[in-house]
Image (cartoon, coloured by chain):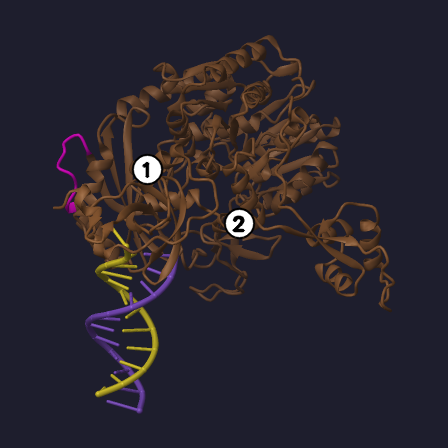
Chain colours: A brown, B yellow, C purple
Amino acid sequence: MMSVDTSTQELGGEVRRTSVLLPLPLSGPYDYRVPEGMTVGPGDFVVAPLGGREVAGVVWGGGSDEVAVERLKPLGERLDVPPLPEVSRRFVDWVANYTLTPPGAVLRMAMSVSSALEPPRSVVAYVHTPDASGNGVRLTPARRRVLDLLKDGPPRTAAEISHEAGVSSSVVRGLATAGWLAEVTLPALAPPATPTESAPGPLLSPDQADAAERLKAAIDHSAFAVALLDGVTGSGKTEVYFEAIAACMARRRQVLVLLPEIALSAEWLDRFRQRFGVPPTTWHSDLTSSERRHAWRWVAEGRARVVVGARSALFLPFPDLGLVVVDEEHDQAYKQEDGPMYQARDMAVVRGRLGNIPVILASATPSLETLANVEAHRYAVCRLPDRHAGASLPEIAAIDLRVDKPPAGKFLAPTLARNVADTVAAGEQVLLFLNRRGYAPLTLCRACGHRLNCPNCSTWLVEHRLAGRLMCHQCGHSERRPQACAACGAADQFAPCGPGVERLAEEVLTLLPETRFAIMASDTVQGPRAAAELIRRIRDHEVDIVIGTQMVAKGHNFPMLTLVGVVDADLGLEGGDLRAAERTYQLLHQVAGRAGRAERSGRVLLQTFQPQHPVMAALVSGDRDRFVAAELAARDRAGMPPFGRLAALIVSGPDPAAVDRVANELGRHRPRDPEIQVFGPAPAPFALLRGRHRRRILAKAPRGTRLQSAIATWIAKVKAPASVRIQVDIDPYSFL
DNA sequence: TCCCAGGTAGTA
DNA sequence: ACTACCTGGGAA
């Protein structure tokens, strides 16, 4: 074994080597030779040869001596991008270690926009040519609109022109070639302006002001600290953490705010703009590639001061991050379920620790993990017990479906139906919540009992009557409703079973034929713009009854909405999931919070077959603390999170026999450590998903066990063919 | 016998 | 992730 010193020396002179992490699922960084005259340091983005191609990567460290000098390839050019900050690099390594993912796969999330590494392009824009005579080209109305638009405005890009003038891009191109428009080159797009001095905040209640002061103090300490902002729906949590954001911006440091579903949070963006005068930089999956490229670069250059984004925004290359806020911290959307599986809320705390900065977690229904951390004094807590501006919490009651039975084939109990009618008659709005898209979750043949299943998954096909199709909610498979049963040949014997929002709408329509209703589900409301428009229609009272899935649960504020009916409160409790009760409580609490957010008081009716269930009892009594205490005690007794640790191994592949072989092999090599309990292998509840057969192994260990290293050595013992994938899910959420 | 497909190992 | 290489089966 050569020492590092001799390995860097060669006969002809000194050979410098450096290790480069590539955004690929390799086992670790690769070493390269640094060419004569090139200077590179850790964090620099470089082009490295790999196989027959060139890949952009990041200089990771000094280099090791694993690979002989003669085998090293020379590094390509250094890219003109700010280096990946040291904190970001440590974060990538930390996440890779924790999630048992190759570091390169984590780096890929940090380098998600390859085009951002290219030099910033200048923007081509158009102006009205002053002396354009038209060259004999006819002026169509569309063309006239473009010229009017540009007459005395600033230069605009082709995309802006076609959007603002409502013409297709070919109209713009045609005008340009005809000489009506002249091309000008603008410098690259500018980032959102920095508010030099943020507008004064709104008047805060004493509770809010107190919480805001404590959060601002944490910013001033500028050290790692986690604070839970625990406030009931409508208590003004956002205004409170806006104060912390203002304080952080005053110190000229960057701010990251995570939201669970940023594409749907137009309301949040409006409030931000009202408070700070400028929009934040956004980061989510609906961005176009050029928006992504700009956002990434602005962050890297430190010019994006406030970024609001989905979980993947955590991996943006902030050079000077001063605060992370995780809003709705209990939300399941923070758990990434494919690729590197990570919990963004937990990783946000890690990012805060590595960057030595404060982290704020906000929720009306904090996760048990976070509440346990508060109890253990690892996290501070700021409570906002009252609704802001005098609004009172809604009154919640249960409807016992065993007694108060809906008519056959219907889903609204007489009590709920009566309340809906009364509320609409009083000129107020109703939300009927049913977390099920489509018309009916199951279709079966009356003649033989055959169920319509997805060909790629072990799931039922959901009828979507508005779209006229049967769809699989797992893989997206969609087909027409067949004429005859594939199993027995009977024609027209299909019976829909169970309710979806569309079927509920049908029931509402027979009940109250004159009402104006809207269905709000991810498949009926496509895109952020359609969602914003529907929300506006509801707020402007153009709709009497909203029938919605969990999409309506998120933070909207409808002043005339006074009744929330939860059609099937038991729905989330099925399935034996560890977090079923917690999640159901959080979701129903959030839905309940839609009622009576203004001066009108709200009322919530929960239809349930088990009104005595702790979740229903807690919702009805409003006693969250007792529910949380009972749930925490039960988890503690069972050694489950947050008191114990879980990890899942998911074995999947197209060939069930090969999948079973690997799963059984893993079962045989289970760790001998008595601390680590192993369950399975067992078929995952969706034993077939997108054409891949799935088996699951669950490992459970007390807190403090080095579960990752045990699993790493465990998996290393089993060789799987390329067609069979072994995924590790540390801290699994979904039990599917 | 040759060619192509599909699976596999290696990339520094 | 990509790709160069290997193995094997089927048609020539």
- In this picture, residue A360 sits left or right of residue A555: left
Q: Chain of mark 2?
A: A
Residue type, mark 2 in image? Pro
Q: Disc 1 vs disc 2: which is toward the camera?
A: 2
- Residue located 45% across and 53% down the image: A475
Q: Amino acid at mark 1?
A: Asp
**Res A100 → quadrant:** top left
The lab-note entry on whether marks 1 and 2 share a chain reads yes
Q: Alpha-carbon distance for marks 1 and 2?
A: 27 Å
Q: Secondary structure at mark 1?
A: helix
Whether A490 is drawn above or below A634: the answer is below
Of residue A82 and residue A249, the one placed in the foreground of this image is A82
**In the figure, is residue A34 to the left or right of A704?**
right
Q: Is residue A675 magenta?
A: yes
In this rendering, is residue A151 above or below A218?
Answer: below
Above or below A61: residue A161? below
Magenta portion: prevailing SS class: loop
Q: Are marks 1 and 2 in contact (CB under 8 Å)?
A: no
User: Residue A2 in the image: x percent, y percent?
Assistant: 14, 46
Crowding around mark 1 (Cα neighbors within 10 Å: few <14, some 14 to 19, many 20+) is some
The residue tagged 1 is A93
* Disc number placed over residue A426 in the picture, else none: none
Q: Which residues are magenta?
A: A668-676
Q: Which residue is mark 2?
A: A119
Secondary structure of the residue carrying tag 2 is loop
- Among numbered discs 1 and 2, the one appearing first in the sequence: 1
Q: Is residue A655 magenta?
A: no
Name the quadrant of the C terminus of chain A.
Answer: top left
